[in-house]
């Protein structure tokens, strides 16, 4: 299993417009191309997850995640905020790189936690934040995932 398998170009946004955590979550949910009701439900689930503790893991990175019936398979999205967003991250730094993970409540393949771990591993590599800052296209993001071979 490779991270690259879970991302598609149309679920990558290199210029998030929102300046708030809620706005960023809504933008990322929108990238998954779900219907309006499903998007609202997913946003609510992600908000609930954030009340348990911020998914801002430090180094300007957040990995909001949840399980929801609105998806039938594990889905991921990526967004970049040039100015950063207050995610109440563990290091109190603004979040610039947001990886969204959504999985159904029951997965036969049980990929949710392994994908979460792989994204955290990828994001914590010393050169990754700098390289994410320089991306010009979604294709370059996918190439970076392939290069890292995680």
Image (spheres, rainbow, N blue to C red):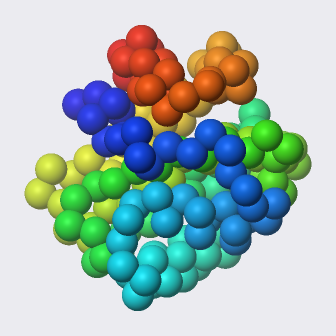
Residue drawn at x 29%, y 28% is 2
In the image shown, does 144 or 15 lie closer to the viewer? Answer: 15
Residue drawn at x 67%, y 75% is 51
Q: Could you say which quadrant of the image residue 72 lies in?
A: bottom left
Residue drawn at x 54%, y 71% is 46
Quadrant of the image containing the N terminus: top left
In the image shown, does 62 or 54 lie closer to the viewer? Answer: 62
Image spot of residue 67 (x, y percent)? 37, 68
Can residue 75 be seen here? The reply is: yes
Residue 74 located left or right of residue 16: left
Q: How many marks?
A: 0
State whether residue 21 is above or below residue 145: below
Quadrant of the image containing the C terminus: top left
**Going by the picture, which residue comes out furthest to the bottom?**
37
State whether residue 119 is above or below residue 75: above
Residue drawn at x 36%, y 79% is 35
Q: Could you say which quadrant of the image residue 41 lies in?
A: bottom left
Image spot of residue 106 (x, y percent)? 20, 68
């Amino acid at each position: 299993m490779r991270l690259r398998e879970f991302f598609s170009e149309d679920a990558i946004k290199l210029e998030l417009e929102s300046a708030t955590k809620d706005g960023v979550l809504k933008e990322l949910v929108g990238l998954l191309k779900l219907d309006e009701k499903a998007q609202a439900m997913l946003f609510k689930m992600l908000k609930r997850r954030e009340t348990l503790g911020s998914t801002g893991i430090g180094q300007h990175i957040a990995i909001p995640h949840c399980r929801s019936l609105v998806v039938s398979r594990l889905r991921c999205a990526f967004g970049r905020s040039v100015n950063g967003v207050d995610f109440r991250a563990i290091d109190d730094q603004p979040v610039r790189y947001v990886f969204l993970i959504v999985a159904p409540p029951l997965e036969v393949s049980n990929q949710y936690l392994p994908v979460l771990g792989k994204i955290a591993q990828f994001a914590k590599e010393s050169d990754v934040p700098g390289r994410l800052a320089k991306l010009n296209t979604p294709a370059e993001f996918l190439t970076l995932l392939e290069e890292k071979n995680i």
